[in-house]
Image (cartoon, coloured by chain):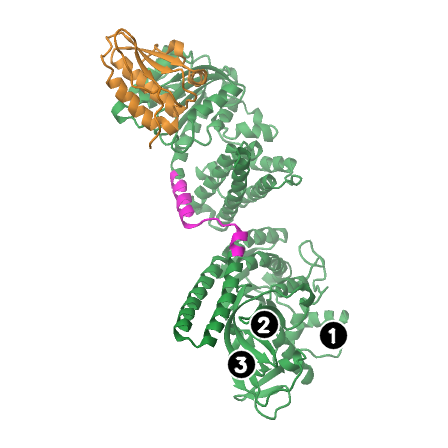
Chain colours: A green, B orange
Amino acid sequence: MSLEEEMRAARANFSVEAADLLVAIESGLLELEHGDPEQADPETVNSIFRAAHTVKGSAGLFGLDDIVAFTHVMESVLDRLRDGKIEVSRELVGALLPCTDHLGLLINDLSSDAEPTADHDHGRTLLVALQPFIEDTPAPVAGASTDATTDGSGADPASDGAGDGRLHLSLRFGPDLLRGGMDPLAFVSYLASTCEILAVTPMTELLPAADDFDAESCYLALEVTLRTEDTPEAILDVFEFVREESDIRVLPVGAGAAPFVDLVQSYGEHADAVRAVLVRHGVLDASALDAAPGGGTPPPDVAPASTAAAPDGAAAPAPTAERRSGTERRGGPVPAQRGSTETAAAQYIRVDADRLDRLIDAVGELVIAGAGASLRAALTGDEPLETAVAEVMRLVEEVRDNTLQLRMVPIGTTFSRFQRVVRDVSAALDKDVSLVISGGDTEVDKALVEQIGDPLMHLVRNALDHGIESREARAAAGKPDRGTLRLNAFHDSGSIVIEVSDDGGGIDPAVIRAKAVERGLIAPDATPSDAEILMMIFEPGFSTKQQVSDLSGRGVGMDVVKRNVTSMRGTIDVDSRSGLGSTFRIRLPLTLAIIDGFMVGVGNASFVIPLDRVLECVELPQGGRGSVMDLRDEVLPYVRLRDMFAIGGEAPRRENVVVVEYAGTKTGLVVDALRGEFQTVIKPLGPLFEHVEGIGGSTILGNGDVALIIDVPMLVQHAGQDLGARAGRTPAVSPAG
Amino acid sequence: MTRTRSPRRSAARAAGDRPARLEIGEELTMSTAAEQAGRLLADLAQLDPAPQTGAEVTLDLSAVPELDTAGLQILLLLRREIVARGWRPVLTASEPVTQVLAVAGLSPQTWHEVTA
């Protein structure tokens, strides 16, 4: 791999990781906002800070100056939050959240060749909004980057390295830097290319005795004096990535002796050596070092700018002292963070989704081939062979299950994204809504997770906009001010069910009915059930809200949601109680790839019914020619697959009924022969057959024949409609979907 | 780690009135640091016959193509050891080494000026 390719790969990696960190920042901020502001969890604040800090540090490695500068300001605010200088407030979170969005755009732009989407003017506006949270700081931590990115703040004289333009750098590099692949000298080389280096002295005193010398530990300490137009903060940023484990100090020369006294003292037994170096560098004269033991009084030659910035003389050395203590503080949480990333690396590996898909595809073929081998083996009547094949099949099934498991991800991550949506949308609507998430660890196929985002988004927005009433309406109805939106997920007989419910006003069937009549969807004198009426909101172009709002009701209606869900082989239905709220329920298959099927035969054709839908098999009672039968005193509507798919030939004398269930509705499928359980890989039908109702896909049998996979929900619906039509529009079962 | 030994990296000799020399013939970087440090310290301890007090001991880096922090601190350690034995440290350096030394405020010309 060429260096260029490596860099590109590393940058791509950075984008991915930074995106993850941004998600962490966002959810952390939301968590803070939801919590008691008085008792903001320090760990949450810390983790947000660390995430921002890591983004900044990594961006610095790639020289992504705009990201570094932007994140720096955010980090400054978070640092102050961490120090308790500012408190968690809606305003603070409200100012920081758009910053994470902007940062997301900046990072996104890295990985795409398209026109940049991030608007830098917008970024500046966002940073200006952060200023109130930084402004009263005595230590202008953000000076360096706000200088470039915001108006005015750079004028803060205290951040301009008050002094004579010289800076003294005391660099004691951390012992593990070399092992970490860093070359500390490179930092100094870099500085030499941008600044005028006046003097450098390596502090050889810190080298251990020859016997204790570990050639792979870093003992390098350098005292560097340079002249630069950059601020101390900008210089400090050069060492961004090693700062945590090193003692890096950037001290303005001529702006007070206290930091130097502190520096000398920090050298402990080698204090004299460093003092001599400082004097030799002309940074301070020996008397000045002695004259300021307390560190309080700056020497008389303090630059006027610094005095002006700090009315009380003691504040003049504060910038450096403050910054350094900041550095030391940061030393604390970072090892912990590194530890956690390492654990995370041990637990997860990132796998290219394509590779995973290829694996699943191959396993699918294996299952088919295995079924074929199994069939052949059964024909030979060779018992040991059959046993061996059965064992292979058992293992194949295990491999299949484990492989499919690889694609399963908890739906919680998808859910938690909606925290932000709920926050923003409810704020825009001036409603107070809390989002309650349950069943977040319910696992679902990754492909579905990706596709479910849009429909869920619409449902959530819809619930916020149309579902939950205004504050006044809630008060009038005697409900608590704060509305509740729930996202719930659970597994139910081979499906995953996702519920979006609100405690709002519910859907009034009368309104829907009136609307449906108005749109000509139903005849004015029709008397559909409430359940049927509610399902009408999924009809195209159906919006009940009189006022078209900014959020929903833009013509992208529930019909789109339904179409999306249907395309995932899922269904959607709605429960609503007037005044109490509504629940939208999406049912999706767990996976799209492989199913356990039950094979049946009709004439010469084979069909596969997903096994998780099959309840039982019974013989069709003789003589009944209608479309319902009596199943233990229960009315069971049934469909003849022979009629349904227009298969010719005579039905055998004894026909069988496979009883299937979907969403609480039972239906019988009449077939000629029952051929038993069969594991199968779903192959999509070509585009030509995409719209054939009742068929969900195809599969290849062990003997090479093609079997069609029955789309049970569709058939159940069909049976229900037939029955409904027969019973004069008062269906005994309410069809789902 | 086994590395093929370059012929130039022969052990130091201080035979007769020739000045004592420690030669380094390959890069002095993180990848060679552990091995080189051990060897050079051992060579230094075995200078035979031991130079007299005040005699020059030369670190010959004229064939070293690359130096980094790990290498630099070995040089600094060697210099301190040489000074501690009462000898005068001398350094000859290739152009790349000279450049790296300059970054750390050092040079072959002033190698003997040890402050501590």
Determine which quarter of the picture holds residue A282: top left
Identified by mark 3, the residue type is Leu
Residue sitting farthest toward the bottom: A623
Q: Is residue A350 magenta?
A: yes
Read off the residue under disc 3: A674
Q: What is the distance, in whole Å, between disc 3 and disc 1 at their CAs?
A: 41 Å
Q: Chain under label 2?
A: A
Q: Choose the circle earlier in sequence order: 2 or 1.
A: 1
Does the CB distance between marks 2 and 1 fall below 8 Å? no
Identified by mark 1, the residue type is Ile
Q: Which residues are magenta?
A: A335-358
**Disc 2: CA contacts within 10 A as few (<14), some (14-19) or many (>=20):** few
Identified by mark 2, the residue type is Asp
Determine which quarter of the picture holds residue A482: bottom right
Residue at (75, 79) in percent of width and height: A525
> Which label sits in the foreground, 2 or 3?
2
Q: Choose the circle earlier in sequence order: 3 or 1.
A: 1
Number of numbered discs overlaid on the protein picture:
3
**Image check: A300 left or right of B56?**
right
Counting from the top left corner in percent of width and height, residue B42 is at 26, 22
**Disc 3: CA contacts within 10 A as few (<14), some (14-19) or many (>=20):** some
Determine which quarter of the picture holds residue B6: top left
Read off the residue under disc 1: A522
Q: Is residue A581 magenta?
A: no
Q: Secondary structure at mark 3?
A: strand
Q: Secondary structure at mark 1?
A: loop
The answer to whether residue A502 shows anywhere in this view is no
